[in-house]
Amino acid sequence: MAKKSSVQKNLNRAKLVARYADKRARLKAIANDKELPIEERFQAGLKLSEMPRNGAKIRLRNRCEVSGRPRGYYRKFKMSRIALRELGSAGQVPGLVKSSW
């Protein structure tokens, strides 16, 4: 089990990302538009840098929904390899069968 503070920190980041997603996308579009004057693009870059860092999507960490583990994460199932194996062996994950040969 991961530290509760790490899991909570990631949840807080996810909320910030959702809150600032539209504004961040608009500012990035302005800053990357080569048609606009350089002053306007520079101002958009400054406003973008003043926004909270944790509002950037890149700061989110994929974590297991069951245990909070940050590594060995399967996106399709939203859980770590360890939790997936345990739940799969118990028959809790639909369509997942443990292989043996």
Image (cartoon, rainbow, N blue to C red):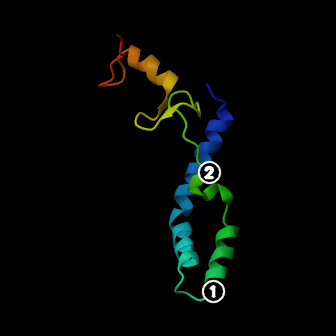
Residue 28: x and y in percent read: 56, 71
The number of numbered badges drawn on the structure is 2
Q: Is residue 42 left or right of residue 74?
A: right
| Helix, strand or loop status at disc 1 | helix
Return the mark for residue 49. none
Outermost residue, left direction? 95
Q: Is residue 87 left or right of residue 55?
A: left
Q: Residue at x 69, y 75 (%)?
A: 46
Label 2–label 1 contact, CB within 8 A: no
- Above or below, 71 against 90 in this view is below
Q: Residue at x 62, y 37 (%)?
A: 7
Residue 57: x and y in percent read: 56, 55
- Above or below, 50 against 63 in this view is below
In the rendered structure, which amino acid carries the disc numbered 2?
Arg
Q: Residue at x 58, y 76 (%)?
A: 31
Q: Residue at x 64, y 70 (%)?
A: 48
Pointer 1 residue:
38
For the N terminus, the quadrant is: top right
Q: Quadrant of residue 87?
A: top left
- Above or below, 17 against 41 in this view is above
| Helix, strand or loop status at disc 2 | helix
In space, the residues marked 2 and 1 are separated at their CA atoms by: 28 Å
Sequence-wise, the earlier of marks 2 and 1 is 1
Answer few, some or many: residues within 10 Å of disc 1's Cα (few below 14, many 20 plus, some between 14 and 19): few
Give the mark toward the camera: 2 or 1: 1
Residue 4: x and y in percent read: 65, 32
Residue 92: x and y in percent read: 36, 20
Pointer 2 residue:
59
In the rendered structure, which amino acid carries the disc numbered 1?
Ile
Answer few, some or many: residues within 10 Å of disc 2's Cα (few below 14, many 20 plus, some between 14 and 19): few
For the C terminus, the quadrant is: top left
Nearer to the camera, 19 or 96: 96
